[in-house]
Amino acid sequence: MSTPESAGALLTIDLNIIRSNYRRLCQEMGGKDCAAVVKADAYGLGVGPVSKALWEEGARTFFIAQIDEGIELRRHLPEADIHVLVGFLAGSDNIFKEHNLIPVLNTLDQIKRWDDRGRCDLQIDTGMTRLGIAMSDLDHIPSLSNIDILMSHLACADDPDHWLTPKQITNFTRAKDHIPHQRASLANSSGIFNFPAAHHDLGRPGCALYGINPTVHQNNPMENPVHLQGKIVQIHDISDQEVVGYSATHKLQAGQKIATVALGYADGYLRYLSSKGVVYIKDQPAPIVGRVSMDLISIDVTNIDCHEGGLVDVIGPNNTPDDLARLADTIGYEILTSLGSRYLRIYKS
Ligand SMILES: *Cc1c(COP(=O)(O)O)cnc(C)c1O
């Protein structure tokens, strides 16, 4: 049982912010419905608490990637509609039935095996070449009497000017006219904000629920629910020319003060952030100096008031997952889904 005293770092997730992000997305959909994408443990934030909060907020349609994730989500939400993106994989018939999961049929073969036995989704590949039935196979799709969600996924919705998106929207409209269905769904988080023409009946946001900016070139309309605090476990007053960390990549000067903080790449603090990342103590930036180790980072706290046992903001108001992603040359999604299992997780609701 982890406690604030025994943990190296504290991860606080504000479920009220996730709920308000969901409301914001529904508003952006102009009153149309919004599903919630909670794959990969709700983007690393914890599928149980997150999906329950979204259910309380009115979400009824949930998407996960893998069948195992569907089984887990069913334990948390006995009544939700759970849609499995990866598809109706061979040998999984009984699992779908036992856990009352809805498959996204992605291939003609999956449609054949499904054999029109009940409610399902159908995914069309409108241009991403990842999952779904090719546009050239539209005429070969056997008739299905109970398609709930007809869907496709946008590859470039984060870029409002990308050539592929209008093509995908046109393709999807063609498929929609062709195939009888209950609800049509195309837009992910960025699609909801950047492409009203992709709204259709149901939005399918993931990252924006968790505070990642879906609009890239504009201010973030979402709020960050993640606060990650690392614990200072030692402070060094540098009296001579010294070096810090593995491979001695960073030289120190006399008079500097260095704090060692108990989190590292084993906790998802990417090693790429060596000598690049920055944490905050109150509002003062403390840069990472030297290599990120497995369990520890070193930060420059010269002229910053701090003490052993004190906490530093590794993710917070001054350094959001998007900020960290920029420094790490990746995307906020990867920062969130890398959040480690050693953190003491605290849910605010
Ligand atoms: C992950 C995923 C989403 C959510 O995408 P975001 O960019 O996180 O909003 C929606 N639809 C499908 C098919 C996905 O795989």
Image (cartoon, helix red, strand yellow):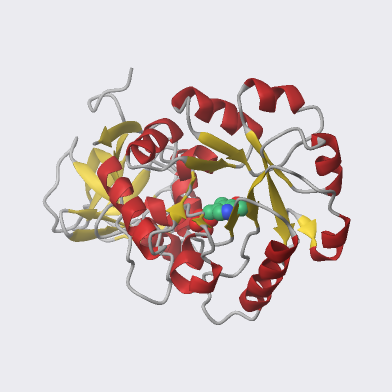
Q: Where is residue 11 in the image (x, y as percent from the top left)?
A: 31, 38
Horizontally, is 131 left or right of 12 in the view?
right
Q: What is the number of callouts on the image? A: 0
Quadrant containing ligand 1: bottom right
Horizontally, is 284 left or right of 6 in the view?
left
Q: Give the camera-side residue of 77 and 131.
A: 77
Quadrant for the C terminus in the image: top left
Quadrant for the N terminus in the image: top left
Residue at 45% over, 57% down: 332
Residue at 21% over, 57% down: 256
Against 205, residue 177 (above or below) is below
Q: Position of residue 164 (x, y in %)?
A: 66, 76
- In this view, which residue lies farthest toward the top? 1
Q: Position of residue 315 (x, y in %)?
A: 31, 51
Query: Which quarter of the figure has residue 71?
Result: top right
Q: Give the camera-side residue of 156 and 79.
A: 79
Against 104, residue 345 (above or below) is above
Horizontally, is 91 left or right of 213 in the view?
right
> Quick check: can you spot residue 227?
yes
Query: Which quarter of the figure has residue 212?
Result: bottom left
> Quick check: can you spot residue 289?
no
Q: Give the camera-side residue of 80 and 345.
A: 80
Residue at 38% over, 59% down: 31
Q: Where is residue 238 in the image (x, y as percent from the top left)?
A: 23, 52
